[in-house]
Image (cartoon, rainbow, N blue to C red):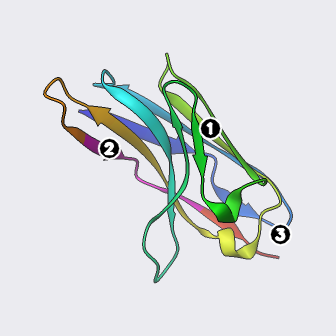
Amino acid sequence: QVQLVESGGGLVQPGGSLTLSCAASGSIFGIYAMGWYRQAPGNQRELVAHISSGGRTNYADSVKGRFTISGDNAKKTVFLQMKSLKPEDTAVYYCNAKHATITGSTYDSWGQGTQVTVSS
């Protein structure tokens, strides 16, 4: 089993910056991608950004140019640098890890979530 531990959330003013961190431990063998999703009240959970073990990144259109995802594949850690934050970025941010098994199936692991609030 994998544990994903997130840190770095908090309250920030519009236009401010935050960096989220996530570290995986336990059964990390087979993780081929890590990233971040977010869920605002009343909304579905949505992809924010993802990075593959090869370094390929993918961003939601709403955060392109403002957020940067990076990671250490060997340590199975992932970071989300968020700049120019807007009130609509307010949400619970969840770390995600994607796993592949020897049978070829895939599954997701999730962190407990960290609150990001953008407000003046």
Give amino acid for label 1: Phe
Give amino acid for label 3: Pro
On screen, 87 above or below 76? below
The disc, 1 or 2, on the residue closer to the chain's N-terminal end is 1
Residue under pointer 2: 109
Residue extending farthest right: 15
> Which of the two residues, 54 or 80, is positioned nearer the viewer here?
54
Residue at 62% x, 38% y is 79
Give the left or right position of residue 32, taking residue 83 as reference: left
Question: On residue 79, which mark appears?
Answer: 1
Residue at 73% x, 75% y is 87
Residue at 57% x, 44% y is 7
Measured in 3D between alpha carbons, the distance from the residue under mark 3 to the one under mark 2, in whole angstroms, is 31 Å
Residue under pointer 3: 14
Q: Position of residue 95 (x, y in %)?
A: 47, 47
Local packing at callout 2 (Cα closer than 10 Å; few below 14, some 14-19, many 20+) is some
The disc, 1 or 3, on the residue closer to the chain's N-terminal end is 3
